[in-house]
Image (cartoon, grey):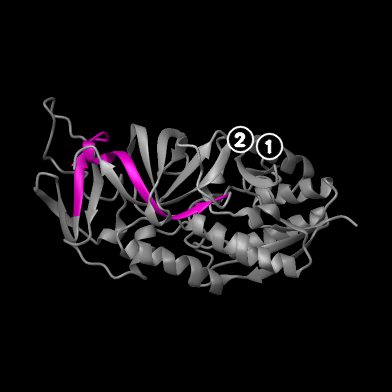
Amino acid sequence: MPKRVVLGMSGGVDSSVAAWLLKQQGYEVIGLFMKNWEDDDDDEYCSTRQDWIDAVSVADVLGVDIEAVNFASEYKDRVFAEFLREYEAGRTPNPDVLCNAEIKFKSFLDHAMALGADLIATGHYARVRENAGQFELLKAIDASKDQSYFLHRLNQSQLSHTLFPLGELHKTEIRKIADELGLPNARKKDSTGICFIGERPFREFLHRYLSFKPGPMMTPEGEIMGEHVGLSFYTLGQRKGIGLGGSKKHRDDDGNHEAWYVARKDVASNTLYVVQGHDHPWLLSQSLAADQVSWVAGKSPTEIKLTAKTRYRQHDMTCVHSALPEGRFSLQFEQAQWAVTPGQSAVLYEGDVCLGGGIIATSTAQTQ
């Protein structure tokens, strides 16, 4: 009997081609469409209805059984509640990391096993390799699409049951396969952003869930530049939406006006600090400390000199990893990193192997 694989099918081209690839490899494939959000689920911003239609249409073309499952309650309790807590604390969380760990590779995995699955699969761009009895999480072959950063919390048990059919392919190949198969979603635009927000204005969305209190917007020298609308609505390194674009102050010797950036949030005094210039010292950090640590191998790496990403799509940066009490760790970078943001993930690599990581708690700017 062929092994049964339950595949997360989102209605997008990636998971659709993943279904075909798995069938080509001889697996029995069952599609599972996850509904993770119900609040204000309308067609203006949320594409759930169309995504379900696309997923069913693809399943019909490929001859794959598909069912829908509602994880909205689990999502709200395990992902969205934490998302709001982090924003209220002045940090900038990455819900995609938490969604993968808590929903796609926990609730989804449990449901799949109940359906008699031997394995699960998703359309993520990543790879799994078994090495001397250990399962390793590897970067995808297509570096421009690699999603190992978002998967760094996966553990040995989860990886042992997981397939990533797209890990060895480039995105251009995926589109070509979809075209050749005549899939109804072959030209569908890739989804972007946070799954439950869709294309809606982010600040407007947060307004409905978070209390906010305006406060001073200040330079490092103590000059008040204006008023912020609430610390939760800003993130370090932010340039757009600060409200200082038209400021005529602080021109350089040639009369040019440098852009303003969010550099720091002081929750205690409800102060937002802004600086001018992309390379202002307050935006550059030589080190960081991380907590809420998770290692793919189940233990801290023994190597000291590694590489790390402090945000998705960042190039791997050389760093020195040091263990800290209570399971935390610190990273010291060879080159200062730009806008290291509390709440985001610091993910460690050894070559193509993703070792795990943690949530950035603090960073040390070049100028305090």
Name of the residue lying farthest toward the right: 1
Which residue type does callout 1 highlight? Leu
Q: Which residue is mark 2?
A: 142
Q: Which residue is mark 1?
A: 169
Residue at (38% x, 41% y) in the render: 331
Q: CA distance from mark 1 to mark 2?
A: 7 Å
On screen, residue 272 versus residue 320, left or right, reads left
Under circle 2, the secondary element is loop
Other residues around mark 2 within 10 Å, as few (<14) / some (14–19) / many (≥20):
some
Q: Is 94 inside the magenta-drawn segment?
A: no
Residue at (70% x, 46% y) in the render: 133
Other residues around mark 1 within 10 Å, as few (<14) / some (14–19) / many (≥20):
some
Residue at (48% x, 42% y) in the render: 348
Quadrant assignment for the C terminus: top left
Do callouts 1 and 2 mark residues in contact (Cβ within 8 Å)? yes
Q: Is 278 inside the magenta-drawn segment?
A: yes
Looking at the picture, how far across and down is residue 354, in whole percent?
A: 55, 42
On screen, residue 193 versus residue 175, left or right, reads left
Q: Main secondary structure of the magenta part?
A: strand
Name of the residue lying farthest toward the bottom: 73
In the rendered structure, which disc, 1 or 2, sits on the residue that comes first in sequence? 2
Looking at the picture, how far across and down is residue 341, in whole percent?
A: 34, 48
Looking at the picture, how far across and down is residue 303, in whole percent?
A: 49, 37
Residue 339 in view of the camera: no
Which residue type does callout 2 highlight? Asp
- Closest to the observer: 199 or 1? 1
Under circle 1, the secondary element is loop
With respect to residue 108, does 367 lie above or below?
Answer: above
Q: Specify the quadrant of the image occupied by residue 55.
A: bottom right
On screen, residue 179 versus residue 246, left or right, reads right
With respect to residue 54, does 323 lie above or below?
Answer: above
Instruction: Tell me where the magenta segment starts and ends, as one range.
Output: 272-296
